[in-house]
Every structure is written in structure tokens, then in C-alpha cells.
Image (tube, helix red, strand yellow):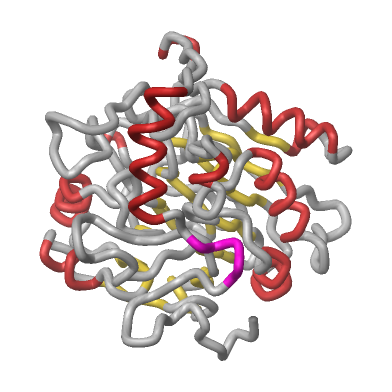
Amino acid sequence: MQPNDKPHHAPGGGFRNPWPGGKLSGTAGLLKWMVVDRLTKRRPPDPDPSVLPRATPAFATPRAPRDELTLTWVGHASFLLQIGGLNLLTDPVWSARASPVQWAGPRRWVPPGVAFAALPPIDAILVSHNHYDHLDAETVRALAARYPEARWLAPLGLTVVLERWGVHRVLQLDWWEETRLGDVAVGCTPAQHFSSRGFGDRNRTLWCGWSVASPARRVLFAGDSGYHPEFAAIGDRFGPFHAVLLPIGAYEPRWFMGPVHMNPDEAVQAFRDLHASRPPLPGKRAVMVGMHWGTFKLTDEPMDEPPRRAAAAWQAAGLDPADLWILAHGETRRL
């Protein structure tokens, strides 16, 4: 796909995955998974939530040095990124459930790794799409009230809902478009997924990942995505990356989840694709950071399986074990 083409814009409005592997299973597939599979197939047991590690955050306050990249995992796809002297949040969710209501739906296995009240000044928030485990109304309202001058970057179609929740500074971007936050360049990158918050709104808003580049460091937040053929193009356009945040969880059953969620093996391949034409600069390391696991029970694999499978795939690819980062909830790491 060339940057000026728009095959992900659906005829008549809305959006679509433009690749053969991005076709969704639809309602019939969902019913088969939720009814037939649940009655006929036994799911692997989950561990006790206490096995999921937790750490005390150690991010810089109020800001990290401009030449430093600091990552702190809040949980799921929520990170505090400190880059280029700015504090950014990705897909912030602090609620107890990833759901339209707080009395039902997937409940957190681990509390947010960073207490909301302990956040440093937030300069910008990056939103990948509108699913409840990535875009939470109560968290958005709380951030909008506490940081009214923060910039919100979102894919096409989300301005209306964000403004309804109290956000005042929203910029929508399409795939391959870029903007700047001071000295930091932010690019909207393709992803293979879908959008919906209710009945009748399927794929009316876009989904994406985000590249963030300061003069000293580059990071990719891949959003929520199945494996697709554009990772090499993303690396060529926005790399080379020092850190890549890739989803490694919510992947079973593959026949249903494959188009929209990578498994750990595919995440490792995506990491390799991203560096195919633009490898790390000499003397620089590139790390993969696993996300989208260990926080909400969304699919059928055991909650503690994704890191093990990621480590096995990483070893099979002959990559340096030190460059695979599986963070504990609340853990901070620096480049």
C-alpha cells in the first residue's frame, strides 16, 4: 500500500481492513465461539491472579530527560511514555472493568500499575480505537478534567465522542499522517482490527497504532492488531525504532481471533518485519515490549501463557533475550 492510497476507507463510508487476512468472522462466528465452543470445548485453566507480577513505578517526576525513553506499564495497552521531555499516555483505562457498565463485563485481574492520582503532568494521550478495553469513558472524563490542556490524538471518527466526554483538544489522523508535539513527531500507523461500541456502529471509526519519535528515541505503539503485511512499511516510514510495544495476548481461538489479535509468534514476526529495511542504528538496541495481556480476561488462552509463548518465539528467532521486555504491572524501564 502506498501512503496516498485509501483502500482502508470502505465504499459508502466507514473503514475496513484492506488485506485478505483481515476479514472478520462476523456474528455467526461470535455465536459459534461463545455458544458452541463453550459447550463442547474445555478451556485451559487460569492461574490465580497473584501469579501476575507487580512492581512499584519508578518514572521520572515531573518529566524524564529529553534524550531518555521511559516506559511504565499501567496494564493491558495503557502505558505512561516519557519521551522527548513529554509525558504521554496510550489507551488509558483505569476503570475496574472493560465494559460499558461497571457491574458486568471483564474485570481487572490486577489493579492499575500506576495510581491515577500519582500520574505526572500529561501532555498528550494516544488513542488507538474505540473498544472498551482501550477507550474508557470514565478515564477519559477524569483525564479531561485533570489535564484540560492535554492534546488527544485519535484515528478518524473519534472526535465527537471524546468531545462529548469533556475533551477540548482532539486531533484526528488517518493512516500514514503525522503531526508534531513540540520536538516530537507522532505518526498514525496501520493496524488490522475493527471498531464498535454497540449495535449498528461497526467500523464507523478507524483503528490504528502510533509512532512517536523524539530527536533521540523512536517508539512504536502498535495498538490492537492482527498480523498484517504493512509492518515492514511502517518500519521503513517511521523507524528505526528503539522500542516496539506489541500485543501478545487475547489470541485464542485462532480461527476467530486471528484476523484481529496477533499471537506471540506473530508479534515476534511483526517485530522482525519492522526492522527488516531499517535495523537499529549501530550501537543501538531495539526492544520488544509485550502488552495486551495479563489484565482483562478476554479470550480462551490462560492468562499467564502469552509471556511464555513470546519468550519461546523470541528464542526460536535467535534474538537476544535481553531485548524482550515483559514488564510487571507498574514496572518502569528506561532506554
Taking the spot 13% from the left edge, 39% from the top edge, the residue there is: 101
- The answer to whether residue 204 is above or below residue 45 is below
Taking the spot 63% from the left edge, 67% from the top edge, the residue there is: 215
Q: Is residue 38 visible?
A: yes
**Residue at the bottom extreme of this rendering:** 4
- The answer to whether residue 97 is above or below residue 5 is above
From the image, give the main secondary structure of the stretch colored magenta: helix
Residue 111, x across and y down, in percent: 32, 24
Q: How many marks?
A: 0
Question: Which quarter of the figure is the N terminus placed in?
Answer: bottom right
Q: Nearer the viewer, residue 251 or 241?
A: 251
Q: Within the magenta stretch, is there residue 201?
A: no
Q: Nearer the viewer, residue 239 or 134?
A: 134
Residue range of the region highlighted in magenta in the rendering: 19-23
Residue 27, x across and y down, in percent: 33, 52
Q: Within the magenta stretch, is there residue 21?
A: yes
Left or right: where 73 falls relative to 199? right
Left or right: where 234 falls relative to 149? right
Q: Quadrant of residue 150?
A: bottom left
Q: Is residue 186 visible?
A: no
Left or right: where 282 falls relative to 237? right
- The answer to whether residue 140 is above or below residue 12 is above
Question: Which quarter of the figure is the C terminus placed in?
Answer: top right
Residue 64, x across and y down, in percent: 50, 48
Q: Quadrant of residue 100?
A: top left
Taking the spot 23% from the left edge, 55% from the top edge, the residue there is: 197
Residue 261, x across and y down, in percent: 52, 48
- The answer to whether residue 122 is above or below residue 18 is above
Taking the spot 46% from the left edge, 58% from the top edge, the residue there is: 24
